[in-house]
Image (cartoon, rainbow, N blue to C red):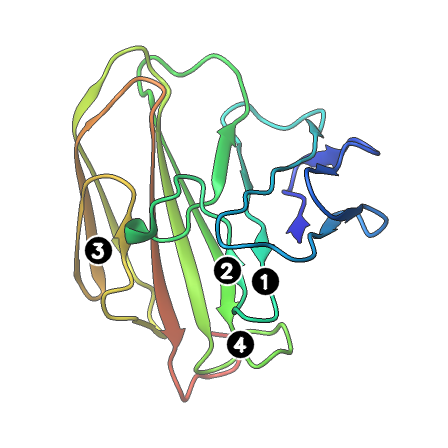
Amino acid sequence: SDTLPANTTYVGGSLTSSQGTVDDSGAPVLSVDIGTMNDTDTVTITFRVTVDAGTPAGTVISNQGSVDSDQTVPEPTDADGEDANGDQPTDIPVGGQPDLNNPLYAEKRVELWLDDGNGVVNPNDTLRYTLVLNNRGSETLTGVSLTDTIPAGLSYVAASALASLGTVNVTAPALSWTIASLPAGGFATLVFDVTVVDPLYDGS
């Protein structure tokens, strides 16, 4: 299944799969029933969306589906296919003229990753942060660095920080990410998990 990303509208009837049956009746949630797959099979699923009018230039359209079977646990899709750096969403920036004075674009997102099933953030739930860097300029950027502070009330999950590029150092609550070089138009993604401390005062 795949939930359409924010700032997009599904193009009706565009969901296709090279195997199985598709169902877009629940859009923005799209579903595909592939059926049986052998260990060497490949299935290709495609769909189209349009970017909503008024979406600011530089907005990153981020999409990530989930696959499951009777024999496996749910697994997020992975944009780069590299297990070692975690499951990466597919990120596409909305076009526009880059700020030539500051071509390095950064975005931070957070989502409820593991919870008790009620969809509300509670103590001991796990949140996943995603940091995205994009070189929107025309030249390679070198010595790229990003620092972040994990908010109070959250506890870093040891060894959960995974970057698609560069190195990460976490000495909670401080996090630093360094990238030797980021090519023009290039993206880098960092994900890390935190748990909500217990006890936590309401409203934190």
Give yes or no for contact between labels 1 and 2 (Cβ–Cβ under 8 Å): yes
Give yes or no for contact between labels 1 and 3 (Cβ–Cβ under 8 Å): no
Count neighbours of disc 2 (C-alpha within 10 A) and say few if under 14, some if 14 to 19, many if 20 or more.
few
Spot occupied by residue 159 in the image (x, y as percentages of width and height)? 23, 65
Vertical position of residue 9 compared to residue 94: above or below? below
Nearest to the eye among marks 3 and 2: give it: 2
- In front here: 83 or 99? 83
Spot occupied by residue 54 in the image (x, y as percentages of width and height)? 68, 25
Alpha-carbon span between mark 3 and mark 4:
24 Å
Give the amino acid type for the residue marked by disc 2 in the picture: Glu
Sequence order check, earlier mark of 3 and 2: 2
Q: Which residue is mark 4?
A: 115
Give the amino acid type for the residue marked by disc 1 in the picture: Asp
Give the amino acid type for the residue marked by disc 4 in the picture: Asp
Q: Which residue is mark 3?
A: 175
Sequence order check, earlier mark of 1 and 3: 1
Q: Residue furthest right?
A: 25
In the rendered structure, the answer to whether residue 146 lies left or right of residue 186 reads: left
Give yes or no for contact between labels 3 and 4 (Cβ–Cβ under 8 Å): no
In the rendered structure, the answer to whether residue 1 lies left or right of residue 67 reads: right
Q: Residue at x 36, y 64 (%)?
A: 193
Give yes or no for contact between labels 3 and 2 (Cβ–Cβ under 8 Å): no
Nearest to the eye among marks 3 and 4: give it: 4
Spot occupied by residue 100 in the image (x, y as percentages of width and height)? 34, 12
Number of marks in the rendered image: 4
Give the amino acid type for the residue marked by disc 3 in the picture: Leu
Vertical position of residue 128 compared to residue 103: above or below? below
Task: Provide the secondary structure element on which disc 2 rests.
Answer: strand
Task: Provide the secondary structure element on which disc 4 rests.
Answer: loop
- Residue 197 numbered tag: none
Nearest to the eye among marks 4 and 2: give it: 2
